[in-house]
Image (tube, coloured by chain):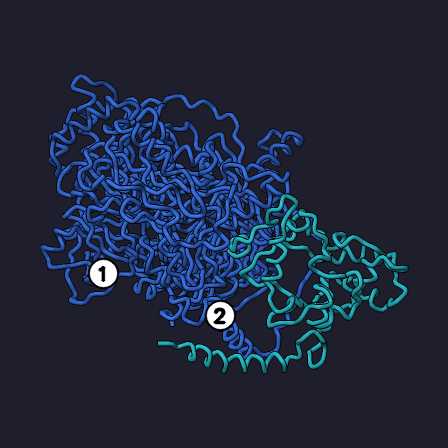
Chain colours: A cyan, B blue
Amino acid sequence: MNRNWLIGGLAGVLALGALAFVQGGGAEGAGAEGEEAVLQPIAFPHDLHAGSEEGQANMDCQFCHFSAERSVDAGIPSVSTCWGCHQVVQGTNNPGEVAKIQGYWDRGEPIPWVRIYKISDHAHFPHMRHINAGLECQQCHGEVQEVGPEGLHTRSGIARSLFGADAGIGENGPVWGGDTMGWCIECHREPNPEGLQQASTDCAVCHY
Amino acid sequence: MSRDLAERDDGIKRRDFLRVVGVTGAGATLTGCSTAEVEKLLPYVVADESITPGVATWYTTVCGGCAAECGMWVRTREGRAVKVEGNPDHPVSEGGLCSRGHATLQHLYHPDRFHGPMIREGTVFRQGTWDEAERLLAARITRAQNPANTVDGGSVMFVGGHMSPSMGRLVDEFVGALGGTRVDYDAVTDAPLLEAARIAYGTSSLPRYDIGAARLLLSFGYDFVESGASPVEHGKGLSRMSAVNDESHAKGSFVFLGPRLSLTGLNADEWIPIRAGSEASVALGMASAIAGPGSTGPYANLLQSYSPAAAAQAAGVSVEAIEALARRFASESPSLALGPGTGAHHRNATAANLAVMILNDVAGNVGTTVHYDPAAAGGLAGASSSFSGIEDATRAMASGEVGVAFVHGTNRAYSLPASAGFREAFERVPFKVSFASAMDETSALADLILPDRHFLESWGDSTPRPGVMAIQQPVMQAVPLFDSKQAGDTLLAVGGHLGQDLGAATFYEYLRGHHLAAAGGSTEDFESGWRQALRLGAVEFDAPDAAVPQLRSPQTALTFDAPAFDGSGDLTLIVHPSARFGGGEFSNSPWLQELPDPVSKITWHSWLEMNPATGEERGIRTGDIVTVASPHGSLEVPVWLYPGIREDAVALAMGGGHTGMGRYADGNGVNALDLLPAVAEQPSGALVTLATTVSVTATGRGRRLATIEGSSDQYDRPIAPAVQLALLGEAVEGAEEEHGELMAPQGVGGFVPVPAEGGAPAAFPLEGARHGEYAQAHEGPRWAMAIDLDKCTGCSACVTACQSENNVPWVGEEQVMMGRDMNWIRIERYYEHVDATQAGDLDVRFLPMLCQHCGNAPCEPVCPVFATYHTPEGVNAQVYNRCVGTRYCANNCPYKVRVFNWYRYTGDIPEPLNWQWNPDVTVRDNGVMEKCSFCMQRIRDAENRAALEEGRPVRDGEVVPACEQSCPAEAIVFGNIRDPNARVTQIVASERTYRVLDELINTQPAVNYLKKVTFHEVVSEAH
């Protein structure tokens, strides 16, 4: 007996519902239409800090994301890290935003950044192994040094700022062409100089 | 559906099905969601240099769980303790940690902890500030001490439990300045042993045992593996003395004498089931046989009046057994006799302990396996006084002499028999102060509660034995939800309000000041010593040479005869400390509640142990609820028939029947102390626990026990086989060849297949088996484990360690009864030969059972979604995000090690108890199958560190799973079996190696067991 129609039918009904939702969420690539803006406490411009154009600071990513080469977490800079420079650098573009740092510093409060992306609990991504394998941050995160403050304001904005211009927005955050694990696997499967697969595709490397 | 999927060419493919499931899953989730939850990413204001986000920071400290004071390593992540383990550098515990030690972490994050100082207002408590509470206390002390106050005046009394030496000193100074008294008492403290040591050798500390050095070990009912003075140290000692040496075939033997086999007893090679209370007669009978008629010494006259024959008469066993044991005890030197323990605190317990000391003395064991320290060292002995001290205190409180009473580290209203009248007396005290960190039966009566810090948040010190000093340091800032304060700091603050000068503003300063003074005031030496103590967890220094003391003449008239028992019941009641809860102070931990008792395998509730013959005589079966009545009380409890107890005795564990301790303790089981009289043994003053007879009558009702035990019988299958010592080495050559072949790893799956009897070896990979992209040549490690069953004591520390490491939830009594317990590792206990009627060989097998990581795993091919598969490193992995919960794998697992999340067990865990979760391990939700992962997160962590350091492969010993880490018996070894020099490879080369059920079903497990070694002939199983 063939019950494929049953599976197909059931799935179809649910898939329609899902599709309707996704479209209602206004996801595909384009960005902010209908999407709730997530206001960050400070309009932080990645481009001014990490960009190498005229007037940009050309800082190393790991100056602020300090633990990326030794920890699973890349690290969020402490207020003292921001204030360390900004007590001298007043900012020419947006001194109002810079002044906020002093407010947090004086009050001894952490900056309450709004989390826009989180890897699923069942997947473990060790930053340090990727950094130590010689990857540039941009290989996964896109041209972050070109992203302005708006990049941190919405989920789709962060998707583009963290993962490049062709990223989409999915159920739990930014996705790459709709198949997030496939994106990891693609790179892991690339051959290394000896012609062997360059990184493991064993499930238990990330899922445990 | 499944049948369609199995026929792969029938239209829909597995991947299509997955896609369908994926989409429907997403749909369901999305429609269930409202707007995205806003989560904050909070950076530090100033980064703490010792903290790297995502990287564990380790601290050493001292376990505050019990008076043994084992060394501890604490793993913290982002400033939060997430796991405790044994400290391998600690000279006493040497890396082991017991279940209770692991469970102390749950008390740190316990949702029942107080959120601040609690001040009584009428019948309820109000939360106050620390300043308010301390000023109130100071004012009440001043008021109580005003001689003109005749209404609520009186003296100050401090009732303590176990505390660190410095804290004890501070309490003495604080209370002394107020002219008050301090009384310490611990329900499971071995006061009779201490008193006997004082009488016999004039020492004021507990004797120290070198169990590992003994060739013949005797325990007179002393349960040193699970309770006793230092369970980890002594359990390790037992394992070292009794485990066979695979080269020399040397093996110490262990004889247990007592009416009931405790967990310790189950490890014995021989059981002499002596009658309860006859320990002194047996010990002296043996001593007289060893000493002979012409003996001298202070006890010569006493020994004249004892003989093996009289001992046999008193104990109800054969005279031959006692004579033979006496001969062996003298000849198999060094020997060691221990006990009796807390479970045998009868009315002549001091005499019984003295008798065992005399036995050790005549056999020449003093100075070799048993040591008496000339001076009290603090630590173990501490200032703990006795039950009789509590009796005096109770009288003083009842008579209105006490104006202010403090209770610290103890729960007297629970841990004393109701007939002691402590509760009533305590209630009469005008102002009662408790330092409990969570509500318990005693604090419920208090007027002021000053919640103490958990030991992981506190400073302290420890002298576990002379020549060893350890510092207890806070491993994290106090849990912010709970506004707690270390009791030492509270006393210093209150002392300040009262105008006392105790020499320090904080307890930390007080502690350091004392150690600085003890170091002779040399700041430089002190600083380096202090730092070393903090880094290593303990420092050793030269202890004064302990001269071998001479046995003294008795100055106290003692009766060595068997004591009289209360009542006219026909069964003697044995009340013993619980292997999980001690005297009851650990009962509010759900890990320990759900930990199967190492003897009965029962969780959550109490049970009455009764011999099957006794049960049959009365028509009582396991699960029948009976009324147990003594002259002092009665209670109802289900029966568990146990062949390891004499027919004339029944046994109840302490720790159940809490009424006001917390959400995980209350209402579970019964309080065995309710059946006991409030009698102090003389002269030690210990609470008598072996005191009464009981009558047992069936109520006609029954219940299902919340047990995890399937069967205590192997039914002649070689699940936990044993080999006789005399046969070791005989079949070595053949075995080596066979194991060499067995161990050779092959392909992605298992090892070289077992040659089928009389035929060609089974093909591997099996014909037609597909391993997809995982079937690649792999040169990396091949993980495997070896478990030596001759070392395993069944203590179950690994079970709690695993639960803590791997975010394994607890499920509760009802779910356990449905067979839904979640532990990834369990200790099977099989009786091979247990005879309570006569002295003879004892054969009980323990088998830690966890996922066997089969090379040819039955669970893998039945999974429709490839959620379980074999990694190239030889681990049977479970991918939670793939699992759809068919449970086919669990059905097909011959070892029954897969557990299923039937409900959202993890979601039901209240804040902040879930702060303990290991951030490196996925928290599983309902509908997901799980099982032992060989601590995959620890493998990854070791790999990451090795790769980061110098891009090298992982070294042997760098991956230590949680079970191996905590094992006090050192029975578990993990490693890469492809490395010929790895410890695991070398251990597995033993002729004792076998794999469970492998020869029957060709599962080719990666877990290798080493057979237990017996002295007697092994008859039962096929091997």
Image quarter where the C terminus of chain B lies is: top left
**Crowd rating for badge 2 (residues with CA inside 10 Å; few <14, some 14–19, many 20+):** few
Horizontal side of residue A7 vs B362, given as left or right? right
Q: Amino acid at mark 2?
A: Asp
Identify the amino acid type marked 1: Pro
Q: How many C-alpha atoms fall within 10 Å of the one at disc 1: few (<14), some, or many (≥20)?
A: many
Count the marks.
2
Q: Quadrant of the N terminus of chain B?
A: bottom left
Residue B419: horizontal and vertical position, in percent? 28, 56
**How far is mark 1 from mark 2, CA to CA?**
53 Å
The residue indicated by pointer 1 is B638
Judging by the rendered image, the residue that carries numbered circle 2 is: B16
User: In the rendering, at what x and y percent does residue B130 appear?
Assistant: 59, 60
Q: Nearer the viewer, residue B628 or B522?
A: B628
Q: Residue at coordinates 41% horizontally, 51% vertically from top-left?
A: B800
The reply to whether residue B399 is visible in this rendering is no
Q: Nearer the viewer, residue B270 or B826?
A: B826
Whichever of labels 1 and 2 marks the residue nearer the N terminus, that label is: 2
Query: In x, y percent, where is residue B816?
Result: 33, 62
- Write down the quadrant of residue B625 in the picture: bottom left
Horizontal and vertical percent position of residue B847: 31, 45
Q: Is residue A87 visible?
A: yes
Give above or below for B614 relative to A101: above
Q: Chain of mark 2?
A: B
Q: Residue at x 57, y 65 (%)?
A: B128
Return the residue found at the far front: B9
Secondary structure beneath dot 1 equals strand
Single out the mark in the foreground, 1 or 2. 2
